[in-house]
Amino acid sequence: MIKTLMKSIGEYKVSSILSPVFVSFEVILECLLPLVITKLVESIKSGIVIWGTDGTLGIGQYGLILIAMSLASLACGALAGAFCAKAAAGFAKNLRRDLFYRVQEFSFENIDKFSTSSLVTRMTTDVMNVQLSYMMIIRTAIRCPLMIIFSVIMAFVMGGNLAFIFIAVIFPLGALLFLILIKALPLFHRLFPKYDALNESIQENVKGIRVVKSYNREEFEKQKFDRASSELQRNFTKAERLLAWNNPIMNFFFYGVLSAVLFIGSYLILSRTPVGEGVTLTSEKISQLIVYGMQVLMSLMMFSMIFSMIAMSIESARRITEVLKEESTLHSPENALTTVKDGSVDFENVDFKYSRTAEKNVLENINLHIRSGETIGIIGGTGSSKTSLVNLISRLYDVTEGCVKVGGEDVRAYDLEALRNQVAVVLQKNELFSGTIKENLRWGNPEATDEELVEACKLAQADEFIRGFPDGYDTYIEQGGTNVSGGQKQRLCIARALLKKPKILILDDSTSAVDTHTDALIRKAFKEYIPSTTKIIIAQRTSSVEDADRIIIMNNGKIDAVGSHEQLLHNNKIYTEVYLTQNKGGKAISSLSEMTQTDKKEGDDNE
Amino acid sequence: MNKNARGKLKAPKGTMLRTLKALFHFYPFLMTFTLILILVNAVISAIPAYFMGNIYKQLEFAEEAIKAGQTVVWSWVDGYGGEITKSMLTLIGLYMISVIAGAVDKQLMAVITQGFLKKMRGLMFNGMQDLPIKYFDTHTHGEIMSYYTNDIDTLRQMISQSLPQLLTSVVMVITLFGLMLYYSLWLTLICLAAVAVILIVTKVVGGGAGKYFLAQQRAVAKTEGYIEEMMNGQKVVKVFCHEKEAKADFDKVNENLFVQANRANRYANMLMPILGNIGHVLYVIIALVGGVFILNKVHNVSISGEGFVTVAGGIAVLLSFLQATRQFTNNINQVSNQVNSVVMGLAGAARLFALIDEKPEEDFGSVTLVNVKEENGKLIECEHRTEEWAWKKPLADGTTQLIRLAGDIRISDMDFGYVPEKTVLHNISLFAHPGQKIAFVGATGAGKTTVTNLLNRFYDIKQGTILYDGINISEIKKGELRRSIGMVLQDTNLFTGSVIDNIRYGRTDATDEECVEAAKLAGADDFITRLPEGYNTMLHQNGANLSQGQRQLLSIARAAVADPPVMVLDEATSSIDTRTEAIVQAGMDKLMEGRTVFVIAHRLSTVKNSDAIMVLEHGRIIERGNHEQLIAQKGQYYMLYTGAFELE
C-alpha cells in the first residue's frame, strides 16, 4: 500500500526530504540551546566580563550566540514548515490527479464496482486525511524521536549519570501511552461507523420529514434517536475516558522526573558526589536538565498523539490504494481496427453477466442481426435487460460468452475510441455538465461549427427551446442540468450524440420525458435526415417504437419476440399487454409524463 | 451547502454565557466540582516555580559556600539540605494534588462533554421534529446536517479542550505574572514587551493563515464540486471518449487547490517555530539583562525584596525567573491558540442554539381522532381499534361531540403563497365526497403539490377554508389530521431497518400479517419475497439496494397499512414501469376503493377514471370535470391528452 501511495509523491520528493532535514537542524539547535544557556549563567557567576577577550567568552558573546542560534532555529523551523506544507499539498494534488486519471481509464464494470459517492469521498476526504498524516509524518513524526534522542544525549553530556533518570522514565511512559492507544484505537474504530450511522439516520429523518409528519411519527423518531444517541454517548464516554488518562499519566511522569532531577541533583551537589568523568553538577545545569526532561516527555506525548491520528488515516490510505490498484477491465487490443465499416450489429450466441461470480446470466443466448440503417425498437419491463443488451454494442461491457459484431467485426477487435465514436449512446441516466449549451454539445464533436450544432439541435427538436432562452446557445447549464426540464435535457443529450455523426445511434429510454408529439417529430427527423444510421431505441411507450422496422421484446434477459408493431400486436402477449395499458380507451395516445419530468428520478440504470 | 455563509466566525454576544448556563444546568454539581478542580490545578501548576526558586537559592548559597572553602554536608533536616528537603516535600505534595486533580477533572470532563453533546443533540433533534415543513423547505439538507456534524464537532472541541485549556492558561498567566513581580519588576516588564511581540506575530501570521484557509476552503469546495460532477457523469465521459478533456480540466482545478493549500499550510506551519523561538530569544534576553543586573548590582524592585546585590542571590532569582518566563510564554501561546478555537466553537454553538430556538409548528387544534363503534345508531368512543373512526370535538359547554370520520373534503375560495409577496394558488374551490377520486393535472410549478401540502397543514392557508367532514381543519390537531390522510409521495423515503419495519411505519401496531397483506395489496409482496431475507431484509441508505419502482411500491404498502380514509398519491407510480403498473393497477384500485383520494399523476390510466380532474395552471383551476367532459371541451386537457402539447 505504502509503495503504491509513494509513487504519487513525484516531483515533491525534494520538499519531502528537505522538511525532515530542516527539522533535524531545528532539533539539534534547540537541544544545544540549554547547553549554551548554562555556559551563559556560569559565566555570569564566575566572570564579571561583558565582552570577553583573549579566548574567554563574556555574557555578551554568549548572548549573541544564543540569539543567533534561536534565529537559525527559527529559520530552520519555518523552512521545515514551508517545505512540509508544499510536500504534503503536492502529494495530495498528485494523489487526486492519479485517482482521477485512474478513474478516467475505468470501464463501466470498474465504475459499477465503486459507487459514485465512494469515489468522490476517496478523492476528497480520504486524500485530505492522507495529506494531514503525511504532513505529520515528515515533520512531527521525525521531530519527536530526534528530539528524544538528542535531548537524552545532551542530558548525559550535561548531567552525567543523572540522565539515567530519563532513560528510566521513557520506557514505562512510552509503554503506558502505547497501551492506552492500542486499547483506545479499536474503540474509536468501532465508534466512528456508529457515529456515521447516527448522522445518516438524522439525514434520513430530514429527507423524510414529510413522511414522518404525515404518519405523525415525531415521537417515535425522537425515541429512536434518543436510543441511538444514548448508546453512542455511553460508548464515546468510555473511549474518551480511556484517552483522558494520557494527560495525568504524562503529568505524573513529568513531575516525577522533575522532582527526581531536582532532589537527587541537589543531594549530589551538596554531597559533591561525582556524576561522571569530568562532569560537575551545578544548579543551572539542573534547571536546564529539567528543560530537556520536558522536551523528552512532550515529544513522547506528541508521538503517541500523532501515532493515533496516523493510525486513523490508514483506512483512508487503504481506500485510495484500492482505486489506484484497480485495473481497467477493458482495453483496446493491439493492432486494433480503427474504422467501422458500416452500422450493422450482430449478436451471436451472447451470454452476459455483470460479475464473473454471479450465478445467473443477465442476458442469455442472444442471437440478433441488425442491418445497417435499420430502426430497431426495444420494449420490456424493468429487469428485462434492455440496457444490458445495448451496452454490449459499444463495448461498455464485454460479453461473457459468444460475440457481438459491429460492421461485421468483433467489437473486441476495435480500438475503443474508434468504436465508441461510431456507436453513439444516449444513456438512460444521462448527464449534462456545468457549462454553456454549446460547450455541452461539443462533447459530441469538439470541432463542430455553430451551424452543425444548430442542425443537430433541429433534428433533436431542441433548437426551438434553446432559442427561447435569453442567452440562446450560450445559456449556462447548472451542475446536473438542473435549470432545464427533463424533456429539454433529454433532447440536448440526443443532439450531443447526433453531433458525433455515428453509424449507430442508441437511445436508451431517452425520450421518456418528451411529449409524444415531439417524440414523433424526433423520429421523423431521424428517418429523413440520417436514414443510413442504424437506430436502436429502447422505450417504455409503445408509441415510441411502433414505426420501427422491427421491435424486440425483452423478457428476463431473453428475446421474447421480434417483429413489427402489427405482428407483435397479433401474436405477442407482453407487447399487447403493454400496448393496451397505455392505450386504454382506444386512441393511440400515451402518457402525460412531460408534465412532471423535472423532478422525476430516472429508473435504475443497471437492469 | 452554503459554505460561504458559514465562513464568518461571529457569534452573538451571550453565546458563551448561554453555553456555560446550559453546561451548569445539565450538570450543576459535576460542573462546579470540575471548575474548582481546574482552577485549583492551574494555580497549583504555577506555584512550584516558587519552591523551585527556593531550591535554586539554597543551591546557589551552598555552591558559594563551597567556593569560599566552607564545609558543606548533606543533611535531611538542617542547613541547605534541610531547606531543600522541605521545599522538595512541599513540591511533591503540590504535584500529587495537581496530578490527582488533573486526572479527576479530565475524567469528569469526558463525561460532561459527551453528556452535554448528547443532550444538545437531543434538544436539536426533538426541536427539529416539531418544526414546520417550511423550515425544511427553506434550508438545504446539507445545511441542516452540518449542525449535527461540523458544529457539534467544534462544540466538542471547545468544551472538552479549548475552554478548560484557556481557563487553565489564563489562571496560570495571572499566577505566574504575580510570581514574576514577586521576583523582579524590571524583568517582568521585558517579559511583557515580548508578549506584545508574540501577540502581534500571532495576529499577523495567524491572520494570514486564516485568510488563506478561507481561500483554501473555497478551492476545496470547487474541486469537490468538480469531482462530484465528473464522477456522476463518468459513464457519459466514457461514452463520449472525453477522458483527455476531463483530465485537462481537472488538472486546472487541482493545481489551484494545491496553490491555496500550500499557502495556507505554510503560514500555519511556520507559526509554531516562530512563537517557540521568540520564547527562546526572550529567555536569552532575560538571562542577559539579568546577568548585567547582577554584574552591576542593579537595584531590584520586587515583592520578595530580594535583589541582584549578591551574585548567588541574584542567580537564584534569575533562574527562578527564567523558569517562570518559560511557563509564562508557553501559556501565552496556549491562550492565543485556544482563543481561535473557542471563537469557532462559539460560532458553532450560536448556530445550534438558533436551531433549538426555531419556533415549533403551532397547533391550536382541539379536535382529536378516536375509535368508535355504533350502538343503536349512536357513536360510542372505544379504547381499542375498531376500524371505525370519529372526530371528537369539544364543545363550548364542556361536552364533546363525535362526528363520524367519512373523508368529505371541501375547499372553498382558497388562496395561498409560500411567501406573502407571491400567491401561488388563487381562488381554489373544490369538493370531494367520501370515496371520490380527484385528480390534479398541470405543469411543474402549477401548484398541484401545494394543494396537498395545505390539506394536511404542512402549510396553513391564508384565505378561504378547508372543511374535513364539516370541521375546519384548523380546529383539528395536526397530528390527528395527518394520521387520517395517507401520503404517498414521488420521492420515496425509506428508513434504515427491515422491509417489514418500513411498512409498519404507517401504523406501529400493525401485525406482521397486516403488513404482508398491505404489501400484497400494493403489489410489493412479489419482489419482497424474492429479496435475500424476504420481509426481514435490511434496507440501508433509503433502500439503495432497491429500484426506484420497488421503493415506490413499498411506500404504497406503507400507506395501505395505515388504512387512512383519505389518501394523497403524489406521483406515486411515476417510476413504476408500465408493465409493472399494469400488474399493480388492480391493487391500486383496491387500495383506493372506499377512500377519498387525491391523485397527482402523469399516467392517464391513473388519472382518467377519476371522478373529477382539475387542470391547474399558474395556481388556478382552468378546467374541471371528468375525463369525458374534459375531452369534449377540447381545451388544455385535451391537448395534453392527445400529446399535442408539452408543458415544461
Image (spheres, rainbow, N blue to C red):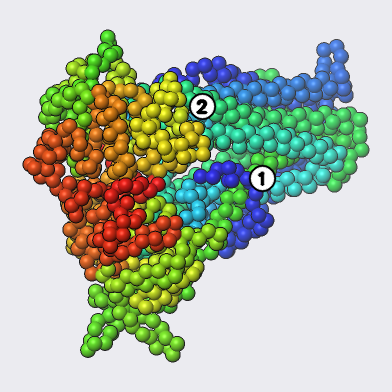
Name which residue lies at 56% across and 27% down: B256
Residue B195: percent from the left, percent from the top?
Answer: 77, 38
Which amino acid, mark 2? Asn
Name which residue lies at 39% across and 88% down: B399
Name which residue lies at 55% across and 29% down: B257
Q: Quadrant of residue A343?
A: top left
Q: Quadrant of residue B449?
A: bottom left
The residue carrying pointer 2 sits among few (fewer than 14), some (14 to 19) or many (20 or more) residues within 10 Å by Cα, namely: many
In this rendering, position of residue B242 left or right of residue A285:
left
Mark 2 chain: B
Choose the circle earlier in sequence order: 1 or 2. 2
- SS of the residue under disc 1: helix
The residue carrying pointer 1 sits among few (fewer than 14), some (14 to 19) or many (20 or more) residues within 10 Å by Cα, namely: some
Mark 1 chain: B
- SS of the residue under disc 2: helix
- Which is closer to the viewer, label 1 or label 2? 2
Residue linked to disc 1: B339
Residue linked to disc 2: B254
